[in-house]
Image (cartoon, rainbow, N blue to C red):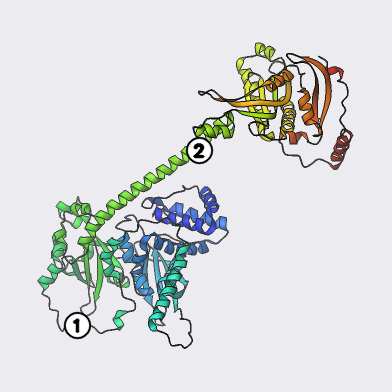
Amino acid sequence: MSSLPQYGFINTCLKSLVIEKFGEETWEKLKTQAEVQDTFMTYTVYDDAITLKLIQEACKILDVSEDAMLKLFGEYFFTFCKMSGYDRMLQTLGGNLTEFIENLDALHSYLALSYQEMNAPSFRVEKRTDGAMLLHYYSDRRGLCHIVPGIIESVARDFFNSEVTMEILTQSEEKERTGKKEHVIFLVLQKAKRPKRKTKKTINPESVDSHKDKEARDVAFQKTENYSALPCCPEKKSHWDIVRSVVKFGKGNLSHTFDPVYPERLWVEERTFCNAFPFHIVFDEELRIKQAGVNIQKFVPGLRRPGSRVDKYFTVVHPQVTFTIFSIRKFINSQFVLRAHREMLPDSRRNQPMLKLRGQMIWMESIQCMMYLCSPKLRSLEELEEQKMHISDIAQHDTTRDLILLNQQRLAEIELSNQLERKKEELRILSKNLEAEKKKTETLLYAMLPKHVANLLKEGKKVEAGEFNSCTILFSDIVTFTNICSACEPIQIVNMLNSMYSKFDRLTSVHNVYKVETIGDAYMVVGGVPVPIASHAKRVANFALGMRTAAREVMNPITGEPIQIRVGIHTGPVLAGVVGEKMPRYCLFGDTVNTASRMESHGLPNKIHLSPTTFRALQNQGFEIVERGEIEVKGKGKMTTYILRQNLYATENEIMGRAEKQHSSHTDQTGKLRETLRSYKWKHSPCPEEFVT
């Protein structure tokens, strides 16, 4: 199927349907799979392929047939149009379902003033001898006919209080049409709803009417309640008042309530008629012109020659049928648009846009002639000027005069609406990009400062220094880092440190400890600051075990062997606060920091060195710890320190924050359990020889 233009109003309706019926997540999934944008502009033209792709992907996601999805869309489209400000316009189309359908083409013709690229379907109603209604549907878009039952059934229920069932009788390609060749005939069976039987009571008639009105209001409210969140177009309907009288029929069929009186002869002179209706053509079954209005002769001079064929000067644009009496009579209830042939116009008009006429075909049975009562098809004053016409060329009784003036204002409103929609979309995109950049900035800020501290600084508040009675601080460095630096290229050092620190940074998130800073090869973290927590020592101990494992995955650029690190941990009170303004840092102060640094500097390669206070904090916490013995600590004198070996109750994968492998055998699990039970009791034995400095 060839691509056709489709306005964004249709895609917006489809988006609202999916969100309201199936949720926002379904629309996000549908939008991603269909590879379409999130927002559609009301008056912007989009390719039909976008709509078709959305429908096809929706059928896959929702697991429904395309026919069912199209019918659901038809039902929702009717409601969406009402909620978008077209409710009164739709209600005035006819007093019954037949009149409503017969005037749909006229409505589409009017909407084309605003939606110039609109390619709407065409409808024709036919009454069978058995009283059944046949609805003829013509469209350039193949395969979308199942939308029609959804729309018509909703219209019948909402506007005419009746139930309608529709079924497809035939589906073919119309040979006699020049466009909209898909022809589908629906059988429409209409059954009015019966009022509920009431018990016999003496009731005030006015109260009955009031009660009915109240019920009607309640029903209408319930119907619209679910759609109150839909985006609506500006509800300006005054421009419709002009054409309302043309298409509005009173409730019920007025032609059955009175018999009109016709005069014995027509009391109108030929000259007066041609002046009163300056744009009209009368032609016979052979399409030979019998008469024409004065102004249509002015713009198409060839019509002054009696006997000329009308199809020599005009072609039928809408409905898209061949120019024959048979085809015209078949679509007699449609509005006809004729376009003049350029080569038949005077030389002075051939470079101008082609003249188009819009009007009604009337068959005169007694004289076997057709009268085309029409007006110039113009949308704005600009088009009027392009045709070198004036308002005075249009009859005073012709509402086209008012439509041109009003539509000029309407087009200005549409252009303003388009600009507002474009600005709104630009703001939405900018806001989305700004939010993404804001998250990046916050992520960077939270990496430099504690989250609550960063939030206070963003709000312009002063961050007071805080005292923490108990926390655990860890320092680490790389063994022989100076020697490595002297023998390697700077980029090798940077790559090595980046690889190691990236692994350590991930572990801080696993064990919920705060990274204070890195200076060269030194890495400092703290537990229990800035958010106090009772298990700070345990968290830092597990982090240290993870550091030792992660360091084995980083290679020494000189030897190609895994690097070795020293880790020192101490527990005690600190003072913490933000220092600096240009590059503020969250720093820790106090003797606890110095002692933790001494534990690292007096530590051993690949060992986790604990101070006495940290050892006491980790007692009975499930760790295997051995005593190193009494050592001389610079600035502290002699201290009995300890070495952390392992966590008896956590696997290496748990320490590293990795998913456990599920294929471990039952034997391995049993052996591990036995080893854990054997190691349950801590052994505070003297330090092995390997710990001696």
Q: Residue 644: give x, y in percent of width and height.
A: 79, 26
Q: Is residue 301 left or right of residue 253?
A: left
User: For the point 34% across and 72% down, which residue is it?
Assistant: 94
Q: Is residue 357 above or below residue 388?
A: below
Q: Nearer the viewer, residue 611 or 236?
A: 611
Amino acid type at image mark 2? Ala
Marks 2 and 1, Cα distance to the nearest angstrom?
Answer: 75 Å
Q: Any mark on residue 162, and which?
A: none
Does residue 528 appear in this view? yes
Q: Residue 455: give x, y in percent of width and height.
A: 54, 35
Q: Is residue 434 left or right of residue 496?
A: left
**Which residue in the protein does label 1 denote?**
262
Number of disc labels: 2
Q: Is residue 539 above or below residue 487?
A: below
Q: Nearer the viewer, residue 340 or 505?
A: 505
Q: Is residue 8 left or right of residue 469?
A: left
**Which residue in the protein does label 2 denote?**
436
Which marked residue is nearer to the observer: mark 2 or mark 1?
2
Does residue 320 appear in this view? no
Amino acid type at image mark 1? Tyr
User: For the point 50% across and 23% down, which residue is it?
Assistant: 582
User: For the point 77% across and 30% down, which residue is it?
Assistant: 617
Assign a secondary structure to mark 2.
helix
